[in-house]
């Protein structure tokens, strides 16, 4: 337990957190609690620690960045938070749900209902239109058809895609595709939106637009967002920054010093 | 509301018509091939066995050395009375068979002449036009409808050697070894036999076999015991004992089943490739909370749709092909064969697609994140 442990208290206001605590959760009001989570691949001699005793808390309505180079463990952390990967030890709680205790089947349901994902390369269903891609996730939680259609249309409108609703992904630009993916992530009104390198396939200007939009949607809805990125330029759109290096998670107090 | 599987399968079928068109085309060709083979198998089988299927006889008695062949069997007419008294026999009647050439109104025809006590056991039950000869009536015959192609009509005369009979009726589906049959009295049959097989003259009481109408559940070996040196077989078994019939049936059936196995493989390979190509997408959909079962159902629904389309198109093409097959190729398109092949094709499609289910189940949703970096 000698690693720096980060507490996210008060981060929504942008101010520095209180004194680091080794006892978590130190922040009872937060939506997301990551509590001493480790992930070890393999065992014995060949064991690789991908994530070493990570602790963080993120408030509802916060949009945070998870920064780190390739192979640092940020993918592992966000996968564990999103219920895609099991932790070797530690717990992850989202609201009143202990994600680490859910069965495989419960995790599938949990992801459909409580988590919105935005993937690196949008990963839209290529043979469904923009609107159908949104409606698709609504079928996973059995949203009534009318309500789902209304919500999809409203989201597409907000995302500036109203006139692209009937287009297939291949007919959309990279930025438009990523915007559809954002709409899809918000479709089921999740508590948590997990965003994986959303700008990886976009140029800087477009990347900024997408992240700005993402921030606006998350903030307007009072969602909690975590964005994995290695792009320092996107950090300015987030409330707080966590950095992960060789499996160690730290809270970056002053993001402006990053990269120097 | 539409479930995820319906949305996915419908969307992909509607918007990836090209690739599904390819598998539907492959299945259509397979169904076409299987249906034509099936029609050939049925045509051969029905053409070979009609004379023993389309009669009122439930069993036939043969001499032991005949191995169930009407042609090879030799019995004496007196045996008919012996079998009439056998346990479980309701009635018995003589059967004489002669495979020969004859002459119709338009020239030479192939014939299988059946001599029997018309009206008694072994009489065809498939009269479609005219009448059967009356019991005891001589010089008249009912013939198989196949002879219509040779210009035979009611009132025509058909002769074998110097013996000629007048056609008084038509019966259908009564061919024997793919030859059209002529049904007449034992006396006329014998006269025809003597005319073309002089070596058999002087056997005025020889017949080939005895047609039996048995009580249901009758013990055939007990009936055979009534006359030592005889064997009794059901009419169905007699059909299969006709030389070549069982072999044709099993050969064509094995080709048909092999072809259907190919259909399963085609579907299996198609969906294996499709799933392989969609690994990334399926991982993302799983990450979004799609249950593996929904993805599996998507593939199964697509396989069923492709198989059904393949059956429909293949059937249409096969029936069109049936219209242009020369009449002397024995083909018969039967509805129950079609249903059987349709069901087998569907099963083959589902089984083929099922091979992809394990592959889908193994896709790890965690691979959706951090993919390329």
Image (cartoon, coloured by chain):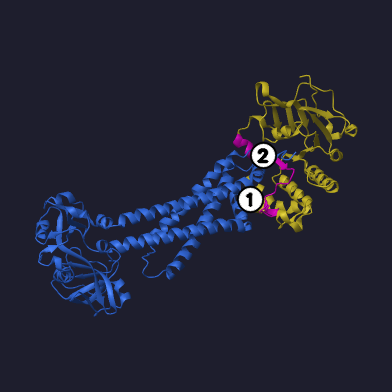
Read off the residue under disc 1: A144
User: In the image, is residue A128 part of the stretch drawn in magenta?
Assistant: yes
Q: Position of residue B274 (x, y in %)?
A: 60, 49
Q: Is residue B22 above or below residue B283?
A: below
Q: Position of residue B44 (x, y in %)?
A: 34, 62
Secondary structure state at the residue bearing disc 2:
helix
Taking the image as drawn, is residue A236 in sight?
Answer: yes
Q: Chain A rendered in what hue?
A: yellow
| Span shown in magenta | A104-132
Q: Position of residue A216 (x, y in %)?
A: 82, 45
Q: Residue at x 21, y 76 (%)?
A: B159
Q: Chain B rendered in what hue?
A: blue
Secondary structure state at the residue bearing disc 1:
loop
Image-based side of A58 in relation to B176, left or right? right
Label 2 Cα neighbours within 10 Å, binned few <14 / some 14-19 / many ≥20:
many
Which numbered disc flags the more N-terminal residue, 2 or 1? 2
């Amino acid at each position: 337990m000698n690693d720096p442990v980060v507490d996210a208290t008060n981060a929504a206001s942008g101010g520095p957190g209180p004194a680091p605590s080794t006892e978590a959760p130190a922040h009872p009001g937060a939506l997301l609690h990551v509590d001493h989570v480790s992930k070890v691949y393999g065992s014995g001699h060949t064991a690789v620690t991908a994530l070493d005793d990570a602790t963080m808390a993120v408030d509802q309505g916060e949009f945070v960045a998870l920064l780190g180079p390739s192979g640092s463990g940020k993918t592992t952390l966000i996968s564990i938070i999103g219920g895609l990967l099991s932790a070797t030890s530690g717990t992850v709680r989202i609201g009143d749900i202990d994600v680490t205790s859910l069965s495989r089947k419960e995790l599938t349901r949990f992801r459909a209902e409580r988590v919105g994902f935005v993937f690196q390369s949008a990963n839209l269903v290529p043979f469904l239109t923009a609107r159908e891609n949104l409606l698709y996730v609504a079928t996973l939680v059995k949203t009534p058809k009318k309500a789902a259609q209304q919500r999809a249309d409203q989201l597409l409108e907000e995302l500036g895609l109203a006139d692209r609703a009937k287009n297939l992904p291949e007919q959309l630009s990279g930025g438009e595709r990523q915007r559809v993916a954002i709409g899809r992530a918000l479709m089921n009104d999740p508590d948590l939106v997990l965003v994986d390198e959303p700008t990886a396939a976009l140029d800087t200007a477009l990347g900024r637009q997408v992240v700005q939009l993402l921030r606006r949607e998350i903030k307007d809805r009072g969602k909690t967002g975590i964005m994995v990125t290695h792009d320092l330029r996107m950090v300015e759109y987030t409330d707080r920054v966590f950095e992960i290096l060789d499996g160690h998670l730290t809270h970056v107090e002053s993001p402006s010093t990053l990269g120097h | 509301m539409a479930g995820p599987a319906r949305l996915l399968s419908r969307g992909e079928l509607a918007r990836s018509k090209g690739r599904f068109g390819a598998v539907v085309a492959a299945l259509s060709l397979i169904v076409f091939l299987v249906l034509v083979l099936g029609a050939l198998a049925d045509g051969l089988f029905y053409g070979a066995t009609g004379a023993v299927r389309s009669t009122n006889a439930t069993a036939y008695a043969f001499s032991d050395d005949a191995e169930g062949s009407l042609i090879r069997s030799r019995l004496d007419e007196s045996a008919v009375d012996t079998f009439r008294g056998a346990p479980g026999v309701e009635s018995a009647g003589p059967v004489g068979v002669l495979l020969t050439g004859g002459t119709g109104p338009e020239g030479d025809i192939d014939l299988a002449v059946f001599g029997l006590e018309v009206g008694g056991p072994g009489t065809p039950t498939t009269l479609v036009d005219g009448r059967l000869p009356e019991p005891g009536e001589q010089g008249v015959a009912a013939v198989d409808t196949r002879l219509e192609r040779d210009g035979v009509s009611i009132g025509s005369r058909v002769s074998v050697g110097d013996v000629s009979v007048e056609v008084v009726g038509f019966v259908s589906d009564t061919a024997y070894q793919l030859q059209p049959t002529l049904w007449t009295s034992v006396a006329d049959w014998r006269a025809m036999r003597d005319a073309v097989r002089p070596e058999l003259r002087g056997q005025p009481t020889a017949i080939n076999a005895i047609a039996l109408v048995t009580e249901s559940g009758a013990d055939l070996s007990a009936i055979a015991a009534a006359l030592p040196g005889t064997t009794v077989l059901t009419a169905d078994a007699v059909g299969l004992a006709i030389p070549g019939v069982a072999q044709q049936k099993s050969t064509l059936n094995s080709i048909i089943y092999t072809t259907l196995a190919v259909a399963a493989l085609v579907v299996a390979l198609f969906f294996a490739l499709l799933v392989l190509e969609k690994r990334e997408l399926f991982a993302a959909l799983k990450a979004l909370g799609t249950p593996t079962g929904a993805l599996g159902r998507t593939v199964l629904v697509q396989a069923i749709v492709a198989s059904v389309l393949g059956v429909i198109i293949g059937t249409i093409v096969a029936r069109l092909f049936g219209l242009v097959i020369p009449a002397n190729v024995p083909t018969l398109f039967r509805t129950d064969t079609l249903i059987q092949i349709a069901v087998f094709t569907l099963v083959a499609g589902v089984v083929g697609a099922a091979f992809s289910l394990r592959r889908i189940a193994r896709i790890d949703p965690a691979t959706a994140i951090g993919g390329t970096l």
